[in-house]
Amino acid sequence: HILAVSEHTAADVRGYAASLGVPTPPITVTRNGSSFAEFLPKLEPAGELRQDEVPERFVLFVATIEGRKNHDLLLRIWHRMLAEGDDPPHLVCVGRLGWRSSAFISGLVETDYLDGRIRLMRDISDTDLQGLYRNCIFTVCPSFYEGWGLPVGESLAMGRVCVSSDRASIPEVAGEFGTYIDIEDFEGSLAAIRDMIRDTAKRKRIEAKIRRGYKPVSWRAVAERVIEASRE
């Protein structure tokens, strides 16, 4: 019996079993949670980040820094906006260094982090992460592949627009509340992110839709689903 975090992952398992010529065992889709409320006290303690560590205006990208997450695309987009005279917000990347991150890190170092416009943060607390979601302009998730897409759900649960790729399980997480880009189309991706930065009224309309309709997945519900599947 296999537990999968998404229908897309379950389909991948079935495809893999078929490629091996073996029967597919029962699969239960458990999903992943998107709620911070179950883990943080109602009276939130102060976070560890200092005020000067968080830019006043920023877009948030929560992901391990690795090739699959596609940080290179955002580096190119921010570089282009600056080169064409835009004044984009900072890009705050939260995540540990992973595999195939050398090209992105080299690009940052060579440009002095785009003159300080891109910031990296690692190993921050849940309290600080929640604060970053709350205070960002919007979030981004241009991944090539996600088994689920945890930061997408977290962003929506916090009422923030997430500009994401339309691949793998991400549409399963965001549904009608997602703002999708074709990550193979650089000009289109650039235009979409520029538009989300500039058009405050549009962003607020999408945020209002998210707050009205998006239903966060509780981690308690996930745990109950896991327990139920384990008993089958």
Image (cartoon, grey):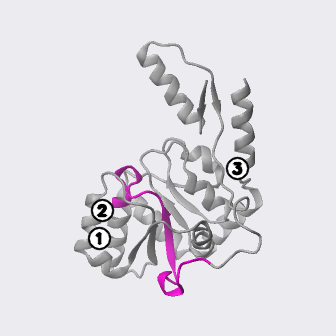
The x and y percentages for residue 191 are: 43, 65
Q: Earlier in the sequence, mark 3 or mark 1?
A: 1
The x and y percentages for residue 51 are: 54, 86
User: Vertical placement of 132 versus 36: above or below?
Assistant: below
CB atoms of marks 2 and 1 within 8 Å: yes
Is 218 part of what is drawn in magenta?
no
* Residue sitting at x 68%, y 76%: 45
Q: Which residues are magenta?
A: 47-72
Estimate the spatial distance between the alpha carbons at disc 2 and disc 1, rounded to whole Å. Answer: 6 Å
Mark 3: amino acid: Trp
Q: Earlier in the sequence, mark 2 or mark 3?
A: 2
Estimate the spatial distance between the alpha carbons at disc 3 and disc 1, rounded to whole Å. Answer: 36 Å
- Residue 7's image quarter? top right
CB atoms of marks 3 and 1 within 8 Å: no
| Residue to which mark 3 is pinned | 219
Q: SS of the residue at dot 3?
A: helix
Q: In this rendering, does residue 178 appear at all? A: no
* Residue sitting at x 46%, y 71%: 92
Q: SS of the residue at dot 1?
A: helix
* Residue sitting at x 63%, y 48%: 175
- Residue 66's image quarter? bottom left
Mark 2: amino acid: Phe
| Residue to which mark 1 is pinned | 108
The x and y percentages for residue 146 are: 49, 45
